[in-house]
Amino acid sequence: MTDVSVSPSSGRKYSGEREGLAPRSRPLIQRPDVLIFLAILALVTICATVLAQMGYVSTSTVKLLGKTLCLCLAALAMDLVWGYTGILSLGHFAFFGIGGYAIGMWLMWDRTELIVLETLAQNPLPPTPLEIEEAIGAQIFGVVGSTEIPWLWAFAGSLPVQLAAAVLVPGLIALVFGWLAFRSRVAGVYLSILTQAGTLALSLWLFQNDSGLRGNNGLSGLQNLPGLDDVPQSTISLWFLWASALALGGAYLLASWTVSGRFGSVLRGIRDDEARVRFLGYEVEHYKLAIFTGTAMATGIAGALYYPQAGIVNPAEIAPIASIYLAVWVAIGGRGRLYGAVIGAAFVSLLSSWFTGGGAPDIDLGFYEIKWTDWWLVLLGLTFVLVTLFAPKGLGGLVDLWTHRRSTRVDDLGPDQGSLRAEEDRP
């Protein structure tokens, strides 16, 4: 169906699909950026798998790549909510941590239950369900001086329930928060402060021992999958690498489809001039709520894949500074570009591991020794400032130069923003 509109200056109708105004969106499979991204993602994953099987890539490196892909997925979600919609959320990484806690509860419970059953099986009498429950509680919560199992762990032994919680709990929190904030028309810096305050409150609650999630100890031993003690970590790391790659690839396809249609046009309109979009009759709150909730769920999936590779999740992962880092990654990569968010997250993640993991040699100046483990955050902050001042398009702008494309196309507009001079000059 052709989109027909009226030029205010000439009064004549013209097709919204004509070149230079609103070109018909091509199928995702025909878009070069999507094809190139999926090809690079597949190439990296296959090469890492082959090299790991041949012994040229260590298990820790494979885990680093898998975790990086999860961070790229979180950055992709952040770019949708900030780069395309203009909502600077300083609490999105909290959804990442919630997803990690949800899957971490199942990993700890199931593995602890296997250990407890194996230990109690040596007793002369078979254990009762109450004895098993008390033993599991002592194993998990003894570190915080408790043996009682909190209500939060009621379904911790069910993998389907915990997988659903990793997606639905972030979505539900985002839905409630977004509905309250957007219907009150809270926007700009005030919304950013609210998201940051909510994240801080959540992290402070998790730091308490009576939160039911082991306080500042967090959940540990997540790299050990229950019932797979005979499977080496080298194999498990490859499984998670592929799962992370598939999740990122699917999310990129979904995000590309979202921003390429009418929905994406409305999102960009909200970012650039929310009042005008509202005046045109669009329910701005509904669009904001949809993208805020959807990206929260995607970030929860990223966290559920990340922490089994990291091995531990604790309240520090949900602190507001983590969400600020997420925004910095997107800014460095170039917000408003899906591939820019991925580039920024991958660049910072890999560079951070190199500087803080001992890969970068310390510099001895004679009077002072620069240790990159101490100076990495300073370097990251300096990079953010330089990119903001001198390269506002971020690293994604380099891709635009390389492909000889501009990120935004400026049409030859007539006297008003709703018509094209070529259309107006036509008799």
Image (cartoon, rainbow, N blue to C red):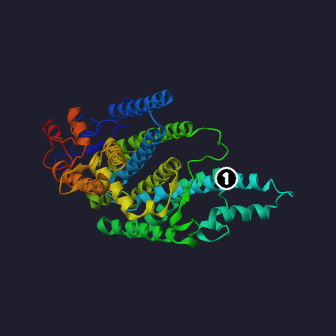
Q: Quadrant of residue 141?
A: bottom right
Q: Please tell me whether residue 207 is drawn above or below residue 65 in the rendered image.
A: below
Q: Quadrant of residue 188?
A: bottom left
Of residues 69 and 403, which is closer to you in this image? 69
Judge from the rendering whether residue 146 lies leftward or rightward of residue 390; answer left or right: right
Number of marks drawn: 1
Q: Residue 277, image x and y in percent?
A: 30, 57
Asked if residue 268 can be seen in this view, the reply is no
Of residues 274 and 309, which is closer to you in this image? 309
Q: Residue furthest right?
A: 125
What's the residue at 53%, 37% (across, down)? 234
Q: Residue furthest front?
A: 366
Q: Quadrant of residue 166?
A: bottom right
Quadrant holding the C terminus: top left
According to the picture, the residue beneath numbered tag 1 turns out to be: 110
Judge from the rendering whether residue 41 lies leftward or rightward of residue 402; answer left or right: right
Q: Please tell me whether residue 222 is drawn above or below residue 62 in the rendered image.
A: below
Judge from the rendering whether residue 290 lies leftward or rightward of residue 107; answer left or right: left
- Residue kind at label 1, given as amino acid type: Asp
What's the residue at 42%, 54% (across, down)? 291
Q: Residue 177, image x and y in percent?
A: 45, 66
Say which element carries label 1.
Answer: helix
Q: Residue 130, image x and y in percent?
A: 78, 65
Asked if residue 416 can be seen in this view, the reply is yes
Of residues 255 and 289, which is closer to you in this image? 255
Q: Residue 387, image x and y in percent?
A: 21, 50
Q: Residues within 10 Å of mark 1 (few under 14, many from 20)?
A: many
Quadrant holding the N terminus: top left
What's the residue at 41%, 50% (across, down)? 74
